[in-house]
Structures are given as C-alpha cells and as structure tokens.
Image (cartoon, rainbow, N blue to C red):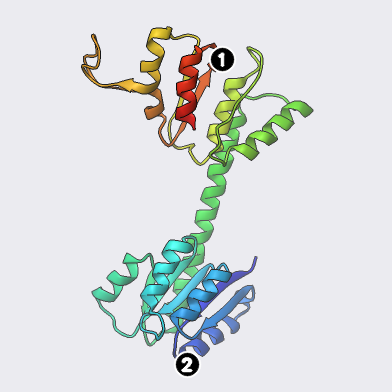
Amino acid sequence: MIKRILIADDEALIRDFFMSFFQSSKEYANFRVDLAVNGEEAIAKLKTSNYDLVFTDLNMPAKSGIEVLKFIAGNAPDTDSVLLTAYAGPESAAKAMAYGAYEYITKPISLEELELIVKRVFERRELIQENLSLQKKMRDNLSYSKIIGSSKALTGIMDLVKLVAPTNSTVLINGESGTGKELIAEAVHSLSPRAKNTFVKINCAAIPESLIESELFGFEKGSFTGAIKTTRGKFELADKGSILLDEISEMNLDLQAKLLRVIQ
C-alpha cells in the first residue's frame, strides 16, 4: 500500500534532505513524497490529496506551519503531522501539540531522529488500524451471534442492516410477531457509529396509555400528583444511542402524532 508524505518547507536544502532520505532506502520504496515551498501550497495540496504524514516548517512565507497544522486538525484528522523548527524549547513543543502534531523536530535534523519518528508514526498508524478492524470484527460477531441462518432472505436482510447502520436515518422494521425484529434492531445499533452508547428498548403495547407519554418523554418533579422526582424519559436516555419502539402501531393515534414530531 502506497504511503503518502508531504514536506512543507521554504528551504530547498531541507526539502532535498527529506527527498534524499525517502529515496535512499528500499524500505521506503512504497512511499510517495510531495513537496511544498510554503504553507499556502501545503494547504492547497492537502485539499486535493490524502496524506498519511505531513512534515511542516514552523516559519514559512504565505502561511505558517501552525496554519498548516490548524488545517490538518480541522480537515484531515486522520493525517499525522510533525512540526519542524529551528528553535527548540517548550513554546515550540506546546504549539505543536496544541494543534495536534505527533512530534516536533529541531533543525538541523539528524537521520537517526527522522528515521525513528517515521518508524513510530507508521507503527502507531498500523496499531490504530488493527484496533479499528478488531473492534469492527467484535461488533460484527456480537451483532450476528444471536441471528442464526444462512438463507437467501436472511442474507439479504443482513446486507440491508450493513447498509443502513452507518446512517442517521430512522428505521422501520416490519415483521410478524416472533420473526426477530428486536434482533435486527440490535444488529443495526451494534454496527452503527452509536454502538458505544445506549440501546434503549420500549414495548409500546405493554405500557398503559396513561403512562407511556411520561415513559417516553420523562417529567419534572412536581409536574403532576405523584411526581416526587425528576425522571428522564426513554428518548433522553437514548441520546447519541438508539431507541427501539416495539409494537409502535399499538399506540393511540394522538401519541403517534407526538412521536412523529420527535422523530422528525
């Protein structure tokens, strides 16, 4: 897999040093290196290409290295960055770290230091990718462990689950009683970006009509007789997670209208 590096420095000697470093060893044969003579050109390249690692000088014309780091932090968070500076000290380090730089290097740059930083950055990136892959595998296994079957129909349903889970859409799951609607809802939640947050289940048919509104939306202390404390509703408990409204068709139409406003 090609690894992409961007070097931003207004000194030709520094740019040549980096280019020579990455071209000098077979170890870096799969590295593609681009050069920028100032911060403005670096940001322009970052807008059109994805980079794994950016080395940027602190003091450059047009735009500074700090402005490059700010752009990376706001627009390319998966890109690692290293700040180059001619002045060592806590202020330079603080600036680098404040804007998300992985490390900073003091000029003149030694081959040993550069090699060590490149090695650490890509080892870390590989560990992060392995961790993300493992988390996804665990979520997949968790999602499917209760869903047993290999029929064409079930495979089609699971393909739909994978398609809809990453989105923020409201999902309507239809099916007769006992067909596993709740399992599908759990699978959608487990494969979604909300998987780390709460999955709240509520059976709309099992709660008396007089209580279901309070269950869903909560209530403040003293808002009615018997409300001795503030109680959070199911929607609030499911914030940033998922809520399953089972047997929603059993609700009265007035409450369904209120739910429609909430969902919208």
* Residue 142 lies in quadrant: top right
Q: Which residue is painted at 36% across and 83% down in the image?
A: 59
* Count of marks overlaid on the render: 2
Q: Secondary structure at mark 1?
A: helix
Q: Quadrant of the N terminus?
A: bottom right
Residue hosting label 1: 249
- The residue tagged 2 is 13
Q: Quadrant of residue 83?
A: bottom left
Q: Residues within 10 Å of mark 2 (few under 14, many from 20)?
A: few
Circles 1 and 2 in contact, beta carbons < 8 Å: no
User: Where residue 245 sits in the image (x, y, percent)?
Assistant: 51, 21
As drawn, is 232 to the left or to the right of 119?
Answer: left
Q: Can residue 203 be seen in the rendering of this structure?
A: no
Residue drawn at x 62%, y 24% as measured from the top left: 173
Instruction: Please state which amino acid type lies under the numbered disc 1.
Output: Ser
- Seen at 45% across and 34% down, the residue is 241
Q: Is residue 214 left or right of residue 50?
A: left
